[in-house]
Image: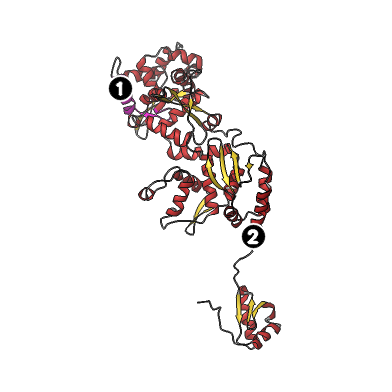
Amino acid sequence: MQLLESLSRLPDDQLARIAAGAGLSTGDDRTALEQDLVALLTDGVRLQALLAELSEEEWAALKVVFFNGGDQGITVELCHQIVNLLSGKRRKTSAKAVEDLQDRGLIYARTQNYRQVFFIPSDLLEVLTDIINRQMVYRICLPPDQAIRPAMPERDLMEDVHRFLAYVYKHEVTLTQQGQIFKRHLRALLDLLGAGGGDEESLVGRYPEPLGLLVGYALDRHLIARTEGQLRTTDELAPWIDQPAGAKQLDLFTYWQDRYFYQDLQTFLSVLRSVGEQWVSVNQLVSEVEPLINPSQRGSFLLRLKHHLSTFLAPIGLFELGQAGTLEEPDLACKLTPAGIAVIAGAVPEGGGGLEGQPQLLLQATFEVLAPRPVPAAVLWHLELMADMIRRTDRTLAYRLSRQSVYRALKIGLSGPAMIAFLRERSATGIPQNVAFDLEAWAASYGQVYLQAATLLRCASPILAQQVKASRRTARFVLGELTPTDLIVDGSQYKELLDALEADGLMPRPDVERLS
């Protein structure tokens, strides 16, 4: 609800009190008065002067409604409960503090779902957000000269989601009757993601993180599907792979936000947006925000915040993590990345994911391929399909080409020339002669032996076989001869062949017999 509509619903006496507190003449024209109040309360400079007159308890009450209700509303009972906890029932009562805020035009009441709630009109909330967040900045930001010890996240979720999808693409991932991944593939996926090591019981009925997030995201975005007892990639995968890295970051964050998000985390991100690219003390931020959130969500807020920072927000590339203070008593610090600033605002970040079109790989004569991070999605995808990752460091991914890895790529449709062309285009060191020779040899070996289904027309004597080959009706079905009495025929047209044999006066058995 906008401020003008909220003012229009107030009784005349309350509107007059708001106008008097703002220094406006009440007059007889209510419409003009409402418009003057909207102009005053949504002007940042004038609103800040009005806020400077608030008492400590009034400020606390305003922040409670601001953080817990916003324009959606917080119930009257919960608002009073939190304000009383903050103030310890000192000075004015919470009810009086809230009443004073109403008479200043800063918060409003309405009935929502049969309950009375306090809320802040959306246009007033927008101005208040900037003011309140700026007040917090100087208390939570670390000094510019503060030494920060970087703390790299344990994983890169953007790499993990590509590696997970590549695994499903190149393996037949079987499912249980309940639609869960069988343990053999589950353990392989957890090892692939560096999350293995759990006992058998821990794998029953759930996917450990980050696998649970990746499976849920891929299913929700229709990149994979449960089909005929298997987990398989879909036609949606190819266009997803081609999306810019920033678009994938935003999409994965949106999915996470819909399923893992709480209001207190929204408060945290709202404050960080106003800070920008500055290092912030996580402990100090929690001490500022925690008293203002729902009492049921307190206590665990710091632990949950650290968990989400380390398992998602930093691994997806939205935050940098570090440590300030002494080694004995470190203080966790965090800082938004440029991508994080864009994503939290709902925009696609620019750049990221490496420089497309530039040589990215260092291909060695030992068949080892080094990929400096961040690795472009297209490069990472091809490496996952044709090589095996052997190690991962903060700066590089290391893969190894082998006969088995190339064979696996050939089986899913990659050709030898395509793999060699990819390496030649992407390798800054070219392709060593021995690597090129073996790749060509491995690719040439593919399909030298193969299985082929054949249908035999078995005849009791060579004379009958010759009669079939000579007949105008049946000769067109014969593709070859295995023995003088066994002819290879087109099995897809066996019914027509049986009719032709019968028309020639022969009496064939009525169906195709299977080998026992």
Per the image, the residue denoted by label 1 is 84
- Residue 19 or residue 449, whichever sits in front: 449
Q: Nearer the viewer, residue 304 or 34?
A: 304
Q: Main secondary structure of the magenta part?
A: helix
Query: Type of residue at label 2?
Result: Ser
* Horizontal side of residue 228 vs 350, given as left or right: left
Which residue in the structure is indicated by mark 2? 445
Foreground mark, 2 or 1?
Answer: 2
The CA span between labels 2 and 1 is 78 Å
Mark 2 touches mark 1? (CB < 8 Å): no
Q: For the point 34% across and 26% down, which residue is it?
A: 79
Q: Which amino acid type is marked by label 1?
A: Asn
Q: Position of residue 141 (x, y in %)?
A: 46, 20
- x then y, percent, for residue 225: 50, 53
Residue 26 visible from this viewpoint:
no
Can you tell which mark lies on residue 378? Answer: none
Task: Kindly state the secondary structure of the residue where label 1 is placed.
Answer: helix
Residue 478, position as x, y percentages in the image: 67, 78
State the extent of the magenta-drawn residues as a range: 68-88
- Residue 77: within the magenta? yes
Q: Considering the numbered disc 2 on the image, is that residue within a helix, a strand or a loop?
A: helix
Task: Please name the residue shown 59% across and 67% down the image.
Answer: 451
